[in-house]
Image (spheres, rainbow, N blue to C red):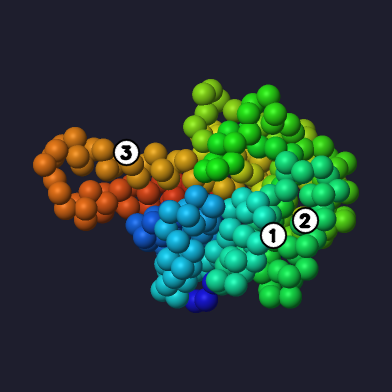
Amino acid sequence: MPLVSVKELLAKAEEGKYAVGAFNVNNMEIVQAILAAAEAEKAPVIMQASQGAIKYAGIEYIYALANLAASKSTVPMALHLDHGTSFDQCMQCIRYGFTSVMIDGSKLPLEENIALTNKVIEVARATGVSVEAELGKIGGTEDDIHVDEKDAFFTDPEEARYFVEKTGVDALAIAIGTAHGQYKGVPQLDFPRLEKIVGMVKAPIVLHGSSGVPDEAIQEAIRLGVRKVNIDTNIREAFTGACRQVLENNAKEIDPRKVLAPAREAATQIIREKIRVFGSSGRA
């Protein structure tokens, strides 16, 4: 089936009280892993590309691979720009066929973040593309975006309400204690803050930096209202771990297919596990 919008997927997630997994893509094998996992679990999924992935693979390849996966799929799939930091980048992704974009103006003052988000929304709405924004800074590093722990701050519920009222954004990423990359310890999520935000905001809530967060914490966040959960680091760990294992067992191996096929399977399995945690298995 053709690529669908994230807005459509999250509306159904809200009805069913589950979350849709948003899995970062970097190459063909990971796209194939997302497709295989989604089909096996009969689950809707979001394939998302960061600035680093677009720089590495090229936007033409990212779109072509994702569009091909969707065309072969019997479950709904979306293609989303993860952490777009400029209007031009969002426009480029819309032109190439992405069905959703994230404009991350979280480092800007509130009113500037609102203005930038509305500028993207004005174009996106005319083309049927959904828009995610971010309020509050999520710590850690993702590609070219780095937020020091001392600079990370949690999302203010009242600001979240005001932001969504002024933008009508289709999804809002918030900071409640998660971080990008690998955690040094066990993250502690601020569930009372999340519950308050969900009660005040009329937009689906997105949880970034979810790799490494205990399953029970993710499920509690979903119970409280999170409808999109981003996973990248766990896929990287599974993928590269499988590659290392192959090469450790056979240091003379030179066939990329024999290295990457186990990596693809490892990625498929971790994505399937996450889909079950999110409650989206069987929801297609």
Could you tell me the amino acid type at mark 1?
A: Phe
Q: Residue 116 carries which label?
A: 2
Front-lying residue, 94 or 216: 94
In the structure shown, which secondary structural element does the residue marked by tag 3 occupy?
Answer: helix
For marks 1 and 2, the one nearer the N-term is 1
**Do the CB atoms of the residues marked 1 and 2 lie less than 8 Å apart?**
yes
The crowding category of the residue bearing disc 1, from other C-alpha atoms within 10 Å (few below 14, some 14 to 19, many at least 20), is some
User: Which residue is depicted at the point 72% across and 52% down?
Assistant: 133
Q: Which of marks 1 and 3 is in front?
A: 1
The crowding category of the residue bearing disc 2, from other C-alpha atoms within 10 Å (few below 14, some 14 to 19, many at least 20), is some
Could you tell me the amino acid type at mark 3?
A: Gly
User: Which residue is depicted at the point 13% across and 39% down?
Assistant: 250
Q: Which of marks 2 and 3 is in front?
A: 2
User: Which residue is depicted at the point 71% across and 69% down?
Assistant: 124
For marks 2 and 3, the one nearer the N-term is 2
Could you tell me the amino acid type at mark 2?
A: Leu
**Do the CB atoms of the residues marked 1 and 3 lie less than 8 Å apart?**
no
Q: How many labels does the image show?
A: 3
Question: Which quarter of the image is occupied by the C terminus?
Answer: bottom right
